Amino acid sequence: MQNKLSVGLSSLVLLQSFTVFPEYFISVSLLYVLIVVVLITYNVYGLMLQKAVSECMALILLMACYLIINDDLIALNFSIFNSSIINDYFAFLTKFVICFSSAIYFLIIANSLKEQRLTSFEYLFITLFAVLGFMLLCSSNDLLTAYLAIELSSLSCYLLASFKKTSSYSVEGGIKYFITGAVSSAFFLLGSSFIYGLTGSINFSDFFDLFECSCFYQFPYHMVDFGDNVAELAWHIWWVMTHDLPELFDYSFLEVGLSLILFSLFIKLALAPFHLWSLDVYEGSPTSATFFFAVIGKLSIFVLLVRLCYVSFFSLNNCWQFYSIWIGIFSIFVGSFGGLKQRKLKTLLAYSSTSHMGYMLVAFSSSTYIGIQMLFFYFIIYIMAGLCTWFIILSLRLRKKGLNSKYNKELGDLVLLRKSNSALAFSFALTMFSIAGIPPMIGFLAKMSVFLSIVGISFYFVALASILFSVVSTFYYIRVIKVLYFENVLVGKLYYPINNNKILILSVLVFLLIFLFINPTLLYLLNYKIILSLI
Amino acid sequence: MLSENMLFSLFSIFLVISAFMVIVVKHPVYALLFLVSGFLCASFILFLLECEFLALLFIVVYVGAIAILFLFAIMMLESKLADLSKNAMKYLPVGFVFGIVLLFPLLNEISSNFEKNIYSNSFYMNKFQNWYDLIDSITDVEAYGQVLYSYFVLQLLVAGLILLLVLVGVVYLTNNFNVSKQTLEQAIFKQLARESKFFFTNLK
């Protein structure tokens, strides 16, 4: 594990704390933006400011990306603030992905905020708060910091969901999100209080130190390549055989605490038995907010899950593997079958997101380090495809008379997009193919790697079931393409044209979807380094 | 020792009774008052356990802020408070079963994991009072302060950020900046002259 180089009082001024420099930067610039906008410019410029502030947020995040990349202390792999913040490659990569994708998000929504009538600048401010929460969660190394980061991000998500005060759907979605989120936070606190009561610590590395001993005889041999070291393997097997140890410790209470925390995180991820809030929230809240929840909001919670289960409580892997496999399978099932009759586009994507979370949870449950690699490989591709999809949905603006511009789309609204904007229709079709997992797109490799990681630990039935469900879910992705291209209608809908700057982002993203299929090694390598930092 | 335990059990009995009454009582205002008394009992118990900070926090935050806020919300909302007791019998068995299913294994786990000191009633129990601790001791509040501003400084900062976020969000959600006519203004005469009839008649 990491060296604890931390000291108490004076740690604020040490060089170590430069590793949280991106977070410092973002929070300070948040305050600065707040002061500048509220006190100086908002009264004078008002609504004209919207686009500029949004691009300013993107700039802040890109600079944070720059800070993350230039952070050479990552190599030292230590934890600071009394080991409540950890700086390893895992945190580095996930923070970078979150920062970069949300910078793209800010660039994408810069124009469409005015069209959605989200004119006040607080929207951007709150979104940046959420990004800050996600980044803190990625590098948090104890339960308290993780809880605070989750609260920071989810409180801002509730606000984003209910941001459109004039729409009762949005308010309803916000309240539903708030109530489920509060319940899940309560579960998190209950579970962590159980764990604290039993172990007397809230630190992940302390948990590792406390429970690592039992890792030895539950050691997953399939994940280690012993190679020529037959003697070592034989020694291990001999050691396990001879030391037919009883349970060193009664883990049952710890399992209760851990599973409460797991359930609370599953609620946040909208996995299948707990996904019901997500349908209404996704449909009700403003489209750009839904975009944010669906694409960016879930990576950091997986980071916390991996830190909890793979680093600190690996010895309890019977417990969390059981829950995550069943919940993963069930959410793939629900996500695939629930979307079949859905005509609303945002709810359809909510189901799709549930099933994707299911695939990732299945990869997570493999309890091998290959599983983690495939999980984050899948996640980065999910984020890319999600950026494409939601970008297209956000930029399709129906040309209608009157002020009442509808943002919630049904499948029928996409009819004959091929005629009116053929390039956009083509990229939408490519994205759908990628999400469905059709071979010339990167989505195929992502899904295949998840299935391979499950087959690797010989859970053939799970792999078979998830492959079958994925075939079912292909139906509704393909149906979108059918609506785009082959609908037998003469009169389609008309859309406003999209400006050129945004098209550049979209074309790069779509190009990546194809290019990474030809050359996926870059992503594989990046995610392989995650494994190296976790061991 | 004995009197302490007596007080402890007294307050816990009051706590359980008031928690039960919160659910049973029909009138929401009375239920809320029972909730307040429950919080007070809990804070007394915490005082007995020498957790002064948590006890004060309970009184200040829960009794002083949250419960009173609820009280205002209930009194101000002129919503129809439907009689929930009809549904109570419908949901009682299900809730009972789920409660048992959750609570019983949990209590079982707790009792099996946290054992009582077996010497607590015997001769070997160390009962002497350390006078030094009584003279030179740090109170709970001081200890929290010392830890909070040194070891948990990052967490404190994050909590401050959360407060800022909530402040901005609440100001946005409740204010109407643009439409000046829709802004609710206080009409003190009207508010004071409001009848309580409407609220109470809806209960029946």
Image: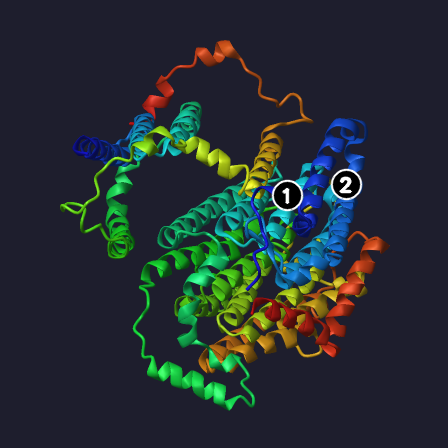
Label 2 CA crowd tier, 10 Å (few <14, some 14–19, many 20+): some
Task: Please state the horizontal and vertical placement of residue B17, each as a whole percent of the image.
Answer: 22, 34
| A19, above or below A476, in the image | above
| A526, above or below A283, in the image | below
At horizontal 81% and vertical 36% (from top left) the residue drawn is: A48
Dot 2: element: helix
Q: Amino acid under label 2?
A: Val
At horizontal 43% and vertical 24% (from top left) the residue drawn is: B72
Residue B136: numbered disc: none
**How is the model colour-coded?**
rainbow
Q: Quadrant of residue B67?
A: top left
Is residue B106 shown left or right of residue A240?
left
| A478, above or below B114, in the image | below
* Cβ–Cβ under 8 Å for marks 2 and 1: no
Residue A12: numbered disc: 1
Marks 2/1 same chain: yes
Q: Chain of mark 2?
A: A
> Can residue A86 be seen in this snapshot?
yes
User: For mark 2, what is the residue?
Assistant: A53
Task: Please state the horizontal and vertical placement of residue A333, each as a whole percent of the image.
Answer: 48, 69
Task: Please state the horizontal and vertical placement of residue A95, each as a whole percent of the image.
Answer: 66, 56
Q: Amino acid under label 1?
A: Leu
Q: Chain of mark 1?
A: A
Is residue A488 shown left or right of residue A1?
right
Task: Please state the horizontal and vertical placement of residue A124, each as a whole percent of the image.
Answer: 69, 42
